[in-house]
């Protein structure tokens, strides 16, 4: 399995930025870094992905270390709706399936 | 926006019974996946499917499991003889072939309860 390591939980105050770290030291050159989140009782939802360069979209930013062995998901202004489990995933295998870790449970404090 | 759909949302079955979980992937997607999530645990890969055949499967996907794309729209997961430990959320996902980043789109899941 493609191994990623994330803190089990983090807290953030509402409307403040959140930095969610992920280590993926076994990443190979062609692996994309994906971030998904899962709200309670829902399926995983795409947040952002990247290969080498930092990426921005309407939901978040992704900062990728130069050696690609770690990355950070940045939520610029956390809202209560951002409370979820965030997964950092490397796609692997013939079918490029996802191997999920335990993720980071984000709590947003009003 | 197109989305992956799954039916039923909740299935209750008795141990030893066969169940079929159904998924309608996004049209024009060519890769299909099943994952499961036991309550309180992480999402686990079961199987990937492309060009009408399994491309990869995990150790969980034993002889009790099978997948099929019976027509141009449905993608099914069959569990032949359910066990108590098969109780979980089952997620279907799909992706198009042209996305080099391999982004997958997940359905809302089917909660399977085996009694």
Image (cartoon, coloured by chain):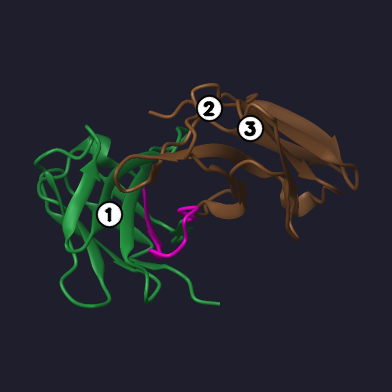
Placement of A18 over or under A21, stated as above or below: below
Tell me if label 2 and label 1 are in contact, CB under 8 Å: no
Same chain letter for marks 2 and 1: no
Q: Colour of chain B?
A: green
Give the numbered dot on residue A4: 2
Disc 3 from disc 1: Cα separation? 30 Å
Give the numbered dot on residue B12: 1
The residue lying at 71 percent from left, 45 percent from top is A83
Q: Earlier in the sequence, mark 2 or mark 3?
A: 2
Q: Chain under label 2?
A: A
SS at mark 2 in the image = loop
Disc 2 from disc 3: Cα separation? 11 Å
The residue lying at 12 percent from left, 54 percent from top is B18
Total labels drawn: 3
| Residue B92: in magenta span | yes
Q: Chain under label 1?
A: B
Q: Nearer the viewer, mark 2 or mark 3?
A: 2
Q: Which residues are magenta?
A: B89-103
The residue lying at 74 percent from left, 37 percent from top is A107
Placement of A3 over or under A58, stated as above or below: above
Give the numbered dot on residue A54: none
Using residue A94 as the reference point, say whether residue A3 is left or right of it. Answer: right
Q: Residues within 10 Å of mark 3 (few under 14, many from 20)?
A: many
Q: Which chain can be seen in brown?
A: A
Give the numbered dot on residue A104: 3
The image quadrant that residue A110 belongs to is: top right
Using residue B58 as the reference point, say whether residue A38 is left or right of it. Answer: right
Q: Nearer the viewer, residue A82 or A72?
A: A72
Q: Position of residue B67 (x, y in %)?
A: 18, 56
Q: Nearer the viewer, residue A86 or A108?
A: A86
């Amino acid at each position: 399995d493609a191994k990623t390591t994330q803190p089990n939980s983090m807290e953030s105050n509402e409307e403040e930025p959140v930095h969610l770290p992920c280590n993926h030291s076994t990443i190979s050159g062609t692996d994309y870094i994906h971030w998904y989140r899962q709200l309670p009782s829902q399926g995983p939802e795409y947040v952002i992905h990247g290969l080498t360069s930092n990426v921005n979209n309407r939901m978040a930013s992704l900062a990728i270390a130069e050696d690609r062995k770690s990355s950070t998901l940045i939520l610029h202004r956390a809202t209560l709706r951002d409370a979820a489990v965030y997964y950092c995933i490397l796609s692997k295998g013939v079918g490029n399936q996802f191997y999920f870790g335990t993720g980071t449970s984000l709590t947003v404090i009003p | 926006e197109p989305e992956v759909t799954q039916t039923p949302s909740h299935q209750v079955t008795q141990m030893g019974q066969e169940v079929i979980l159904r998924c309608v992937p996004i049209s024009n997607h060519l890769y299909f996946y099943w994952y499961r999530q036991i309550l309180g645990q992480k999402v686990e890969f079961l199987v990937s499917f492309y060009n009408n055949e399994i491309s990869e499967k995990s150790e969980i996907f034993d002889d009790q499991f099978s997948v099929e794309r019976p027509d141009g729209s449905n993608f099914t997961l069959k569990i032949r003889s359910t066990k108590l430990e098969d109780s979980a959320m089952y997620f279907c996902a799909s992706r198009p072939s042209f996305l080099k980043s391999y982004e997958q789109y997940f359905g809302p899941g089917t909660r399977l309860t085996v009694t």
